[in-house]
Image (spheres, rainbow, N blue to C red):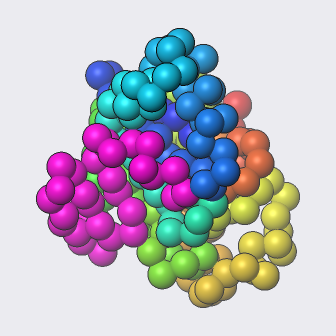
Amino acid sequence: MVTLVRSVNKNILIDCGDPWNGGEILQKLSSLGLGTEDRGPSAKYQLGEQIHVVVVTHGHIDHCGNLSLFKHATLFMGGDVASEGTYSTIPEDSSVTLAPNVELLRSRGHTDHDIIVVVNNTERGRIVISGDIFECANDDNIWKEVSRYPDLQEKSRSEIEDIAEWIVPGHGFMFKNPKNPNST
């Protein structure tokens, strides 16, 4: 699942799909007013510059396959941050404010290095973009089959359910958190 979060003066892309759907992603972003109608070589470059931050929830190819389209963005992946050729790390139990009301948190379970993004104060309340911590809606058992650390992932899922009103899973559509009575 590729998710765009628009904040004040910042466009944040969470996950960037598999290597085979780059054109589809560029087309969708263009339809949202990012990029240009020109489909020539410059279109990718101009669009990539309008994405300021790319967050990869985990390093599987279906979540990071189009990173090369966004060379000018600051990249968050696992515990690493890359911006303009400079690399740094995110401390284990810390959060990073990406923009007003948009926060990145490290998580665990599906892989060794999961990241989630929390978007506060939306029209729908708090939205958590979970990567494959939640594979899809109604994934009560599916996630266990592909989890590297099921116990840690179960804890991460519970923590997300405690704060989210809506969840954007790694695959499929956003869904209302059935365990949060405040979900609207």
Which of the 4 image quarters holds residue 91? bottom left
Is 30 magenta? The answer is no
Relative to 81, residue 112 above or below: below
Q: Give the residue displayed 45% in from the left and 52% down from the top.
A: 67
Residue 158, how many percent across, how many down? 62, 67
Image check: 84 left or right of 4? left
Which region of the structure is painted magenta?
64-92
154 and 4: which is toward the camera? 4
Image check: 76 left or right of 142? left
- Is residue 92 at least partly visible in the picture? yes
Q: Give the residue displayed 45% in from the left and 24% down from the top.
A: 43
Which of the 4 image quarters holds residue 111? bottom right
Residue 116, how many percent across, how many down? 48, 57
Relative to 66, residue 70 above or below: above
Q: Give the residue displayed 72% in from the left and 54% down from the top.
A: 171
Relative to 153, residue 49 above or below: above
Relative to 128, residue 8 above or below: above
Q: Give the residue displayed 70% in from the left and 31% down from the top.
A: 184
Q: How many marks?
A: 0
Residue 34, how many percent across, how many down? 47, 20
- Is residue 118 at least partly visible in the picture? no
